[in-house]
Image (tube, rainbow, N blue to C red):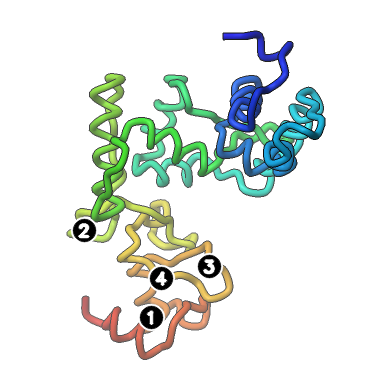
Amino acid sequence: MPDDDNREPESYPDAVGILSRSEGVIPQLVQELLPELNDWGTSLRQNSINIPSLRQALRERLQEKVERHGILRHVAALNLGITEECFERLVNRRLPRFCPRRGRDGQELFLKEELDVFASGFLPDFKTWGTRSSLLREFHRNLESQTGFIVAPQPCEIGGCDELAAVICANSVCRVNAPPRKVCIAHRERLRTREDKSLCEECVRRVLYGDLQGQFQIAGTDERLRRVHPIEA
């Protein structure tokens, strides 16, 4: 491979590749964070391009994205459908394409786009899955078979559910002497004022009928919520 530091990119994909390799950033993020690179590509290389300057811009914008959109380990683990302990072991394996980032305060953060690309690397192309859980279970199987890493899936913590958890209940006292429940999409309801937060089904019933009335505003009409979450499960 030619020395990327000492050559002019021959095309837009070539420039994306140079920046992706040099900064350890997936191509999708290079394209998102450097829209001016597309302007150079559409000009058919008539405009000038300054790779060192673009590298610096990429570093700065990536750091800004990490600060604004980076997620903590417990959320990142749910993105991959695994327990927090399993996620910690996975981080320690330092597998290729797995990219923990750091906030300016040194806090470890992860970008969902990079987690998605990591998982996609263990999935077949041109295949669709009926559910999120079926996709993640195939990712788990392939990760184990290709790397020997033993996966610990994170199940939904509503009794009797076979799906993988996707969100953490926003109620900090969801359970006594235990962390808030991790639940699948079917067993959660979004909060009205914070669509990125959800309550688990058990806490939804407590809002509708029990000790949490008035403490949370759940998206959707009261009629729908009471129909979907009757007082007797």
Type of amino acid at the residue the image marks with label 3? Glu
Type of amino acid at the residue the image marks with label 2? Cys
Q: From the top left corner, tell me how far across and down residue 210 is, in percent.
A: 38, 80
Q: Quadrant of the N terminus?
A: top right
Does residue 123 appear to the left or right of 3 in the view shown?
left
Task: Say the numbered circle drawn on residue 161.
Answer: 2
Type of amino acid at the residue the image marks with label 4? Glu
Residue annotated with mark 4 = 189
Mark 1 vs mark 4: in front: 4
Residue annotated with mark 3 = 195
User: Residue at horizontal 55%, vertical 32%?
Assistant: 26
Q: Hey, which quadrant is residue 201 in on the image?
A: bottom left
Cα–Cα gap, marks 1 and 4 = 16 Å
Cα–Cα gap, marks 3 and 4 = 9 Å
**Closer to us: 157 or 131:** 131
Cα–Cα gap, marks 3 and 1 = 23 Å
- Crowd rating for badge 4 (residues with CA inside 10 Å; few <14, some 14–19, many 20+): many
- Callout 4: helix, strand or loop? strand
User: Residue at horizontal 63%, vertical 36%?
Assistant: 30
Does residue 191 appear to the left or right of 134 in the view shown?
right
Residue 26 drawn above or below residue 211: above
